[in-house]
Amino acid sequence: MGQEIQRASVISNLPSLVRQNPAETFRRVVPKVREVLNGAITEIQLAAATSFLTILQDDIILIHTHTYSILKTVLIHLNHRDPVVSSAWLETLLSAINALPKETIKQEVLNPLLYQSRVSQSIHARLASCRILGKVAPKFESHIVKKELLPLARSLCQDVEPEVQVCICQQFESIAQAIGVDDTRTELLPELVELAGDEESSVRLAAFDSIVSLMEMMDSDDRLHVLVPMVTSVCDASSQVDKVITASLSFRFGTLCNGLSGLLSDEQKHLMLQKFQVLCITGLPTEGNQIDDSESALIRSNCCYNLPAMLVFVDPAHFLLDLYPSFSSLCRDPEVSVRQNAAATFHQVVKLLGSEFHLVHNELLSLMQDDSLEVLDTLTNQLDETLQVVLSRGDSLRLDNKLSELLSALLMAEQKVGCSLRWRLHEKLLQRYSCLARLLPGELLHQNFSPRIFMILTTNKVLPVQKEAARMFCTFLRYNRNQEQRQEMLGQLIRDLAQGRSYWNRLRFLDVCEVATDILSRKYFNKHFIVPALELVHDSVANVRYKLCRLLPRMRSSLHLPADKLLLQKLDLCVQKLLCREKDKDVVAIIRKTVLELDKLDLCEPQFHKRHQWDFLDQKDEVLLLEMEQLEQHQSDGKLNNTDRKRRDGRDGKTSLSSTKSMSVSTSTATSSSSKEMRKVKLSRSRSLSSQPTTSKAMNLDRFLKVKDLDGSSGPGKSTVLSTKDDSMRTSHFTLNTQTTSSVPVLIRSNTTSLLDQASVLDQRDHRTSSLDQRVLRTRTLGQRSKTLDHSCGLKDSQTQKLSTNRKSSSFQSGQD
C-alpha cells in the first residue's frame, strides 16, 4: 500500500533480506529504497542510515560488489537540509570507513571531500569534511597523507568560521599519528601555535587542547619554547577569561605539570602549584559570594581527578605543606559530585603517600561518615586497597586513637548502609571488609567485627547480603589464630543457626556450610560442619530438608576414604532416611536427583586426588596459624625456658672430656639429655590436655611426614629399641597407622565431637591409641638420632657403645613413663 509505516518496516529489515538473498535484494529492493528516500520523512531517513551501516559492517556481504550502490546513497543524503538527518548519514559514513577498502575510500570518499571543503559550500559540509579527514587519515601511508590530506587540513585551518577551525583542531591528533613525529613538528605545530593566538576563545581552547594532546610527540626544545610559554600565559590569564578555558585547563593540569616538570624553573613550578590551589577553591562560597554554579563544581571535580598527578609533581615529601589544604578542602566540598571524585582518587593518594598515610586520616574518616551514600559507594570501590595501605603494619598493629576511630567509622558506615535500602552497596561493602581478616589482629577482629557480622547473618533479610556475611564469617574463622575465639564463633554458629528455633536460621546455616567448603579446609569442614548439617534431616520444615538435599553432593565430595568412613556412613544413612520417610513431593524429587549425582561421585578418581592436593595446602596453612599461636604462648612462658637452659649448661660442664672428639660426644649427650627433659615437659602437658574428652591432636604436618620417613628406614638401633615393645603395643600401633595414614592434623580443638554420639566409644579408644602412638614415634626418633650420631663420629670403642646404649635405654624409659 506504500504507507509510511510499511516503508519504515521494510527498510529496518533490509539487513535480514540481504543476508537471505543478496543478489535479488540489491537488484529489486535497494533501488526502491533509494527511490523512496528522496522525499522521505525523518524517521525513514534515520532507519535507512542505520540499516545501510549494518549492511556495510556485515561480513557476509561482498563489499566490492555492492559498495558503490550503498556509498552513492550515503553520500547523496550527506548534505540533507535537515541537520539531524545529515548528522545520521555522516555517522553512518564515519563508522563504515573502517570496513571499506583503501581504493574505495580514495575514489568514493576523498573526491567528494575535496569538493565539500571549499568555502562556497555550507558550513555543515565543511564540518563534515573535517571529521571525514580525521577519520580517513590513519587508513593511508604517511606520504599519501602528507601529499593529499595535509594541504586540505591547512586550508580548513584558515576557514573564516570558528566552528570549522575548532573542528579541524580536534582532528590534528589522528593526522599527527599518520604522518609521524618529524612532520608533526614541522607541518602541524606551527598551525596550532597560530590558532592558539586566535581572537576567538573557542579556537584558542581547541588549539591548546590539541597541543597538550601532542605533547608526547614534542622534543624538549619544542616543549620549552612553545608549550611552557603557552601554559604560563594561560595560567596568568585564565582568571580573566571565561570558565570554559579554565575547565579545560583544570582537566589537563596534572598531565601538563608532569610533562613539563623537567623544563620548568622553580618559580614556574611555584606558579603552577599556586594556580592549582586557586582552581581547587574556584567558586566556593565566601563572604562576598554565596552562589556556586555548575562550571565551578566541574573545575573542582577536575582538580580531584588530577590530585595523584599533582602529588607526583610536588613530591610526596612536600604534600603536607603544598597540597594538603587543597586536598582537605576537596574532601569536604559542599558539592556531592566533588566529594565523590575525591573519594574516587583517595586510594591513589594513599598509595603515593605510603608510610605517611596518617596525614589523610581525618579525610578518610570524613568520607566514610559522609551524609551522601553516593560518596561512600565511590569510596567502597577501592576501599580494600586503601585499607591495605592504612593497616599494612600487620601483627605490629596496636590499638591507638586513630585505629579506634577508623574501626568505629567502618562499623558506622556498615550500619548506615544496612539501615538503608541500598542492599547492593551493603553487599559490596561486606566484600571489601573481608580483607580485614588478613590485616587486623585476631583480638580486634573478634571484638569489633565478628558480632556485627553474625548479627547480619541472623537478622538481615536480603539473601545476597546474607551470603556475603556468611563468606565474611568463614573468612574470619579461617584466619583467626586464637583457639578459644574460634571455638566461640563455631559454637555460636551451631547453637544459634544449626540448632536455632527459626527455620530461617537453619537455612542460613546450610548457606554457611556451602560457603565453608570454598574457604575452610576439607578436614576442618568435615569435623565441624557435616554432622550438624546432617542432623537437619529430621527438620520439620520441608524447605530445610530440600536445601540439605542440594548440599549433599558437596558434602560427599569433601569426604576422603578411609579416613572419613564414619562420616560417609552417616551421610548414606541420611540419604536412606530421606528416601524412605520423606513425604514432601519437592523434597522427594530433589533427593532422587541427588542420589543420581552421588552415584556419579567416585572418591578415587584422579581429579578427586588432585583436588585434595589443594586441601593439603589449606590444611598446612591452618597448621601454620596454629603454630604461630603456640609460638606466642611459648614466648610468654620465659621462666620455663630459662630453667631448661640452666639445666643444659650444668650438664655440659659435668660431661666435658679432655679430647676434642670426646668433647663433641659429651656435648651431644648433654644436648640429648636436655631434649629429653623438654620432651618430659611436653609429655606432661599432653597428658594434662589428653584428660579433656574433646582434645584433638595438633601436630606440624611436615614433622609428621619426617617421623613417618624415619619409621620406614629401619636399622639395628631401631630394632633394639622396638624389641622391648610387647606385641599388644605393636598391634595397636599398626592399627592406628592403618586408620590415620591419610589424615592430617586438625587446626581447632572443638567441643562439637559430642554430636558424634554414636561413635563416642570409638573416639575415646582412638584418643588413647593416639597418645600411645606419640610415645612410640618419639622413641623411634630418638633411636634414629642416636644411630646417626654414632655413625658420624665413628666411635668403635666400648665406652662410646655403652654411652649410646645408656642413652637409648634412658630415652626408651622416658617414653614409657
Image: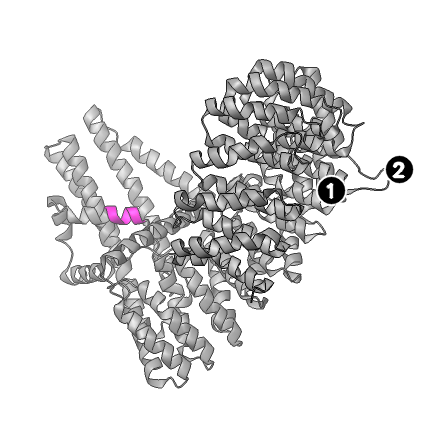
What amino acid type is highlighted by mark number 1? Arg
Q: Secondary structure at mark 2?
A: loop
- Estimate how packed mark 1 is, as few (under 14), some (14 to 19) or many (20 or more) residues with alpha carbons within 10 Å: some
**Which of these two is toward me, 23 or 46?**
23
| Quarter of the figure that contains the N terminus | bottom right
Report whether 584 appears left or right of 219. Answer: left
Q: In the figure, residue 334 lies in which quadrant?
A: top right
x, y percentage for residue 185? 56, 18
Q: Is residue 422 above or below residue 130?
A: below
x, y percentage for residue 417? 64, 57
Q: Residue furthest right?
A: 288
Q: Main secondary structure of the magenta part?
A: helix
Point 40% across, 64% down: residue: 528
x, y percentage for residue 390? 58, 40
Q: In the figure, residue 161 lies in which quadrant?
A: top right
Inspect this view and state whether residue 433 appears. Answer: no
Would residue 668 be counted in the magenta stretch? no
| Quarter of the figure that contains the C terminus | bottom left
x, y percentage for residue 176? 54, 25
Q: Is residue 504 above or below residue 255?
A: below
Q: For the residues marked 1 and 2, what is the alpha-carbon distance in whole angstroms?
A: 18 Å
Q: In the figure, residue 562 lies in which quadrant?
A: bottom left
Residue 287, disc: 2
Tell me which numbered mark, 1 or 2, is placed earlier along the sequence: 2
What amino acid type is highlighted by mark number 2? Glu
Would residue 702 be counted in the magenta stretch? yes
Residue 332, disc: 1
**What are the residue bounds of the magenta stretch?**
701-706
Inspect this view and state whether residue 191 appears. Answer: yes
